[in-house]
Amino acid sequence: MVSQLFRLRSPLRSLCVNTVLVVGWIIVVMTTLMRSYRTCIRPIRILQFHHYIRRSLVHRRAPKILLILLLALVSLYAIHSQLQQTEIIHVLHPGFPLIVYSEDSYPSVLEHDVIGKIPYQMQQDVALRFKHQPKPKSHFNLLSTDREPSCQALIKGDPEEINYALQYMDQTKDKPASIDLSVYIHAPEDCQNFIKSRGYITHALPEETDFPIAYSIMMYRDADQAERLLRAIYRPSNYYCIHVDAKADSSVQKAMLGVTKCLPHVFLASKQNIVDWAQFNSLEPWIYCMKDLWRYSWKYFINLTGQEFPLKTNLQIVKILKALNGSNVVDTTTYGHYARRWYENLPPPNNIQPYKGLVFVIVSRGYVDYILHDPVAHKLLEWVSHTDFPDESYFSTLNHNPHLAVPGSYKGNPETNADVKPYIARFVNWGVGWIDSQGRYPFYWPCGGKRVRRVCIFGIKDLELLVNRRELFANKFILDFQPLALDCLEEWHFNMTLSEYAGKLTIDTTWYQSLDIVKNKVL
């Protein structure tokens, strides 16, 4: 219906166009019905139809016919604009089309009431995100008769659609299409166009603005994947420090430099390291970014790598962090033979008990303040620099020695436990390579993708699990392995963001508020 036409531009313009069309067509229909009633006993014979048209054009019917033609042209233009808008809405990211769903379980970006409830400034971001995207370009070179897999069906775990998607990806030997890094390298030449073409959300809701978050992203490859992560979590009220491994290809470094020059509050780390596995230089970049970020005002610090992706929207993350109320999310395990990593360097300073844990953390500003400015933290940093895997012991140790009074640290049993002390910072599927003190595997799930050094590289079979997790981020994804997994997760994430801004989606943070790390934190 033309009267249902909606535009992601000025609401007043849409109202005027729709009103004119509706009133015009009502006038035409009413006058036609009245004239038909008066002339119903004088039907026009088919053979004389051309005479009727000729008389109509030169007598009183001419203005009416011209009005009908004018309204028809305006209507066709409006319908064409609507079709263009629908086509635009169907384009989410270069390389993959947005599948629009109508089920309540999967929010649709085409629902008029959803778009109408999005704050007007946000509407501009949404419109620009779609309007300036190039046409959908498949990752794969297939016959035009082949349809693209449905993300909705894949997320629901539909076996037939999963099999179809696997065949769809196997039909080409070409690697997934990546964005030319020159797009990022030359971005500073026209930053406004870059921000529009890449679809960044440049306005934040008041609740997001009032709760800024500091992010540190460490990366060494796949600048396009890292940029997609940045785009998903970007809000102008947040702050982002990016550390590119010094041994990364020069094109990757130039690409990320170009991105940072166009986005407010996004910058490269002031110091750049070569990052080696299990060495102290794998911990230093996090500290560099903490120092660089400290000058800004924010509430929480989250560290990421370029091969991760959020499982929660920015607004959901804000609400969850508020529920944590200053407590830190830091993993720890006390089981296994990890003590051999520091055995030769015992004892640590200040009667500290060392612990092993994952490097990914969600910590309060007070925790970062302690790391940067407390002498005990400096002594511990010097001590772990002479141990193996210092990045896996420094954060965990600081958070689980309550006598240090580190803000937001934990006073209870340090062991990560799915029941009492779940690790919500990251969903990593370690398989059977990680066992707790009770002989359980807290990070074991069937892997729908493939395992590399025990870690699951997520594939399309993992989507149903991922979208239902309580963790904030997932690790990890690789662009050249089942790229539909990241594409569909990205599509789902953006649809969730739209519905959330429209007020149709919210998150219950009761479970997060009840976590033991909140109840037993060091104030």
Image: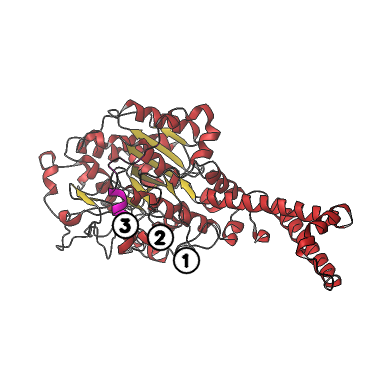
Categorize mark 3 by other alpha carbons within 10 Å: few (<14), some (14-19), many (20+): some
Please state the horizontal and vertical placement of residue 102, each as a whole percent of the image.
Answer: 49, 64
Relative to 278, is 339 above or below? below
| Residue hosting label 3 | 164
Pick the residue in front: 15 or 21: 21
Stretch in magenta: 162-179
N-terminal-most mark, 2 or 1: 1
Is residue 82 located in the magenta-colored stretch of the structure?
no
Is any atom of residue 210 visible in this view? Answer: no
Mark 1 residue type: Glu
Q: Mark 2: which secondary structure?
A: helix
Q: Earlier in the sequence, mark 3 or mark 1?
A: 1
Give, as a three-letter code, the residue at label 2: Gln
Alpha-carbon distance for marks 3 and 2?
13 Å
The residue identified by callout 1 is 103
Is residue 166 covered in magenta?
A: yes
- Density class for disc 2 (Cα within 10 Å; few <14, some 14-19, many ≥20) is many
Q: Position of residue 344 (x, y in %)?
A: 10, 39
- Cβ–Cβ under 8 Å for marks 2 and 1: yes
**Residue 25 % position (x, y):** 76, 61
